[in-house]
C-alpha cells in the first residue's frame, strides 16, 4: 500500500514541481523583459 | 469508446500545440481552458482508480500503480515526436517558433520519461521482487531517456545559439529514427521478457480499461498544458534576447 | 564540380592525412591493444566463457576505439579553410558527409581487423568458424558507426565538453549496431544460422542513417 502511495505521490510531486518551476522561470523572464524594455 | 477518446485527445493535443506554437503570444489564453480540463479530470481519474477499478487478483492493491504508470507512456513518446517534428520544421523554415516547440517537447517529454523510470521500479519491487529488470519495455524506455538527455545536454552545451538549434534539430531526427531499431535490438538481446504483456491484448476487464483510458486522456492534456507553458517561457526568452540585441544595436 | 567528385576529394584528403600523420590510426590501434590486453587479463580463463563474451566485447572495444577516431573527424586546422572552400561548391553538401564518413569507414575497418586479430592472439578466438558472416557483420557495423559517428562528430564541433558529449550522443543511437553485430558474430561462431530479418534490419539501419547524414549535412554545415 505504501508503494502505491509512493508511486502516485512521486508523479504528483514531479508534475506539480515542474509546473511550479516553469512558473518561477516565467516570472523571472517577465521581470527580465521589463528591465530591458 | 475509451480508446477512441484517447486517440482523439492525442490528435487534438497535437493540433492545439501546433496551432499554439505559431503565435504563442496571442494564443496563450487558450491554455487556461486546457489547464482547467486537465485539472478537472484528475479527481475523476483518481476516483476511478480507487473505487471503480476492481482490485486485481494476483497482485492485489499494488496493481493500482498500473493506472499511474501506463498513462505516462503516451506523453513520453509524444514529447519525442514533438521534438523531432519541431526540429524538422525548424530545419525547413528556419523559424524559431518550431525550435521552441522542439525544446518544449523534449523537456516535458523527459519529465514523463523519468517518471516512468522511477514509477516502474516502485511497481516492480513489490510486484515481482526486483527493482529493475532488463526487459523490453523498461530497457527501451531507458534508452529513450538517454537520447532525451543527450539532446538536452547538446542543447545546453551549444549555448542556445543558432548552431544549437540546428544541431539539436538534427539530433532529434536521428534520435527518433533510431528508436524502432533500438526497440528491435533490445528485443533481440533480451529474448524473453519479464514485463507483463500488454494487458489490453490479454483482455483487460472493462472497468480497468476505462480507468487507464481516463488516466491516459488526463495525462495527455497535462502534458499538453505543460508544453504550452514551456513554449511560453521559450518565447519570453527569445523576446528578451531580441530586446537586448535591439538595445545594444 | 560534381557531387561524387567532391566526396572523393574529401575522402582522399582525409585518407592521405590519416596515412601520412598516422595520428588517428596509430592512437586507435594502441588504444585497442591496451583495452584488449587489459580484458584478457581480467576475463575468466575458461575458453567457453571467453567465447560467449567475445562477440559483444569486440564490439564494445570497437565502440570506444571509434570514439577516438570520430572525435578527430572534423578537427584538423586545415579543416577550417578546406571545408569552407568545399562548402561553397555548388553541390549537395551531403557529398562532404559521404567523403568524411568514407574515410572514417576505412579507419574503422582497419581497427576492426586489428581488434579481431588481437582477440585471436590474446583470447584464442577463432574467427574462421563463421568467417563470412563475421566479416559481413563487421562491415555493416563499421558502416553504421561511420555514418552515425560522422554525423554526430559534426554535430558536436565547437560545442563545450565535446569529450563528454560525443559518447553521450553516440551510445544510445548505436546500441542497435552493438546488438546486431555481436548477435550475428555470436551466432556465426556457434555455427548457428543468422536470421534474414536481422540482416535486413541491420542493413536498413545503415541505410537510414547514411541517408539522414547525407540529407541533413546541408543544414549542419551552414555554420
Image (cartoon, coloured by chain):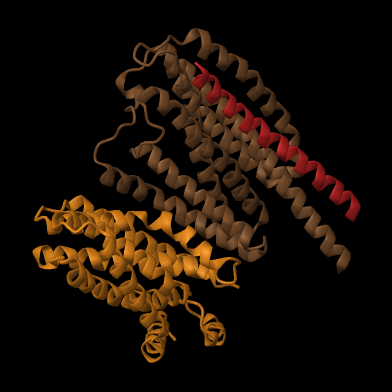
Q: Position of residue C188 (x, y in %)?
A: 14, 58
Q: Can residue B134 be seen in this snapshot?
A: yes
Question: Quick check: C115 left or right of B216?
Answer: left
Seen from the viewer's position, the closer of residues B12 and B108 is B108
Residue nearest the observer in this picture, C206 or B98? C206
- Answer with the quarter of the image where residue C181 lies: bottom left
Q: Is residue B28 left or right of residue C76?
A: right
* Above or below A24: residue A12: above
Q: Colour of chain A?
A: red
Left or right, B72 with reference to B56: right
Q: Write the residue at 57% across / 39% down.
A: B111
Work out which quarter of the rendered image holds the N terminus of chain B and state it: top left
As drawn, C151 above or below B198? below
What residue sits 17% from the left and 53% below the top? C196
Tell me the colour chain C is drawn in.
orange
Number of marks in the image?
A: 0
The residue that appears at 36% across and 64% down in the rendered structure is C63
Residue in the picture at 10% in, 68% down: C128
> Where B177 sits versus C160, above or below?
above
Residue B74 visible in the current orientation: no
Give the brown chain's letter: B
Quadrant assignment, res C104 = bottom left
User: In the orientation shown, which residue stands out farthest toward the bottom?
Assistant: C20
Q: Quadrant of residue C9?
A: bottom left
Relative to A1, C24 lies left or right: left
Identify the image quadrant of the C terminus of chain B.
bottom right
Amino acid at each position: 500500500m505504501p508503494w502505491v502511495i509512493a508511486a502516485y505521490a512521486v508523479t504528483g510531486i514531479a508534475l506539480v514541481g515542474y509546473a511550479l518551476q516553469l512558473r518561477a522561470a516565467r516570472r523571472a523572464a517577465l521581470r527580465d523583459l521589463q528591465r530591458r524594455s | 469508446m475509451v480508446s477512441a477518446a484517447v486517440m482523439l485527445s492525442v490528435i487534438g493535443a497535437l493540433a492545439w500545440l501546433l496551432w499554439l506554437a505559431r503565435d504563442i503570444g496571442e494564443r496563450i489564453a487558450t491554455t487556461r481552458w486546457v489547464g482547467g480540463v486537465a485539472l478537472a479530470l484528475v479527481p475523476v481519474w483518481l476516483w476511478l482508480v480507487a473505487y471503480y477499478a476492481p482490485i486485481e487478483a494476483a497482485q492485489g492493491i499494488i496493481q493500482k500503480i498500473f493506472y499511474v504508470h501506463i498513462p505516462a507512456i503516451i506523453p513520453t513518446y509524444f514529447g519525442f515526436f514533438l521534438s523531432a517534428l519541431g526540429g524538422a520544421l525548424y530545419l525547413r523554415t528556419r523559424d524559431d517558433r518550431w525550435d521552441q516547440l522542439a525544446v518544449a517537447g523534449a523537456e516535458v517529454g523527459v519529465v514523463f520519461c523519468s517518471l516512468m523510470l522511477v514509477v516502474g521500479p516502485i511497481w516492480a519491487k513489490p510486484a515481482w521482487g526486483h527493482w529493475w529488470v532488463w526487459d523490453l519495455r523498461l530497457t527501451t524506455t531507458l534508452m529513450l531517456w538517454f537520447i532525451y538527455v543527450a539532446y538536452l545536454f547538446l542543447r545546453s552545451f551549444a549555448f542556445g545559439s543558432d548552431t544549437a538549434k540546428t544541431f539539436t534539430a538534427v539530433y532529434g531526427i536521428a534520435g527518433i529514427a533510431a528508436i524502432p531499431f533500438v526497440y528491435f535490438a533490445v528485443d533481440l538481446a533480451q529474448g524473453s521478457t519479464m514485463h507483463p504483456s500488454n494487458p489490453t491484448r490479454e483482455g483487460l476487464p472493462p472497468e480497468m480499461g476505462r480507468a487507464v483510458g481516463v488516466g491516459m486522456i488526463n495525462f495527455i492534456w497535462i502534458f499538453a498544458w505543460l508544453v504550452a507553458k514551456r513554449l511560453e517561457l521559450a518565447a519570453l526568452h527569445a523576446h528578451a534576447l531580441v530586446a537586448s540585441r535591439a538595445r545594444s544595436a | 564540380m560534381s557531387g561524387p567528385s567532391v566526396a572523393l576529394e574529401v575522402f582522399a584528403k582525409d585518407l592521405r592525412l590519416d596515412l601520412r600523420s598516422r595520428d588517428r590510426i596509430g592512437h586507435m590501434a594502441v588504444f585497442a591493444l591496451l583495452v584488449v590486453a587489459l580484458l584478457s587479463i581480467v576475463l575468466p580463463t575458461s575458453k567457453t566463457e571467453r567465447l560467449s563474451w567475445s562477440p559483444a566485447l569486440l564490439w564494445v572495444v570497437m565502440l570506444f576505439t571509434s570514439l577516438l577516431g570520430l572525435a578527430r573527424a572534423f578537427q584538423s586546422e586545415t579543416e577550417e579553410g578546406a571545408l569552407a572552400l568545399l562548402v561553397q561548391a555548388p553541390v549537395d553538401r551531403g557529398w562532404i558527409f559521404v567523403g568524411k564518413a568514407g574515410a572514417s569507414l576505412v579507419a574503422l575497418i582497419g581497427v576492426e581487423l586489428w581488434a579481431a586479430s588481437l582477440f585471436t592472439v590474446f583470447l584464442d578466438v577463432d574467427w574462421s568458424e563463421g568467417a563470412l558472416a563475421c566479416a559481413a557483420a563487421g562491415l555493416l557495423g563499421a558502416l553504421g558507426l561511420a555514418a552515425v559517428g560522422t554525423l554526430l562528430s559534426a554535430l558536436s564541433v565547437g560545442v563545450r565538453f565535446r569529450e563528454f558529449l560525443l559518447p553521450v550522443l553516440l551510445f544510445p543511437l548505436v546500441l542497435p549496431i552493438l546488438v546486431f553485430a555481436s548477435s550475428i558474430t555470436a551466432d556465426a561462431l556457434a555455427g548457428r544460422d543468422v536470421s534474414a530479418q536481422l540482416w535486413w534490419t541491420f542493413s536498413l539501419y545503415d541505410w537510414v542513417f547514411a541517408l539522414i547524414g547525407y540529407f541533413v549535412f546541408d543544414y549542419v554545415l551552414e555554420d
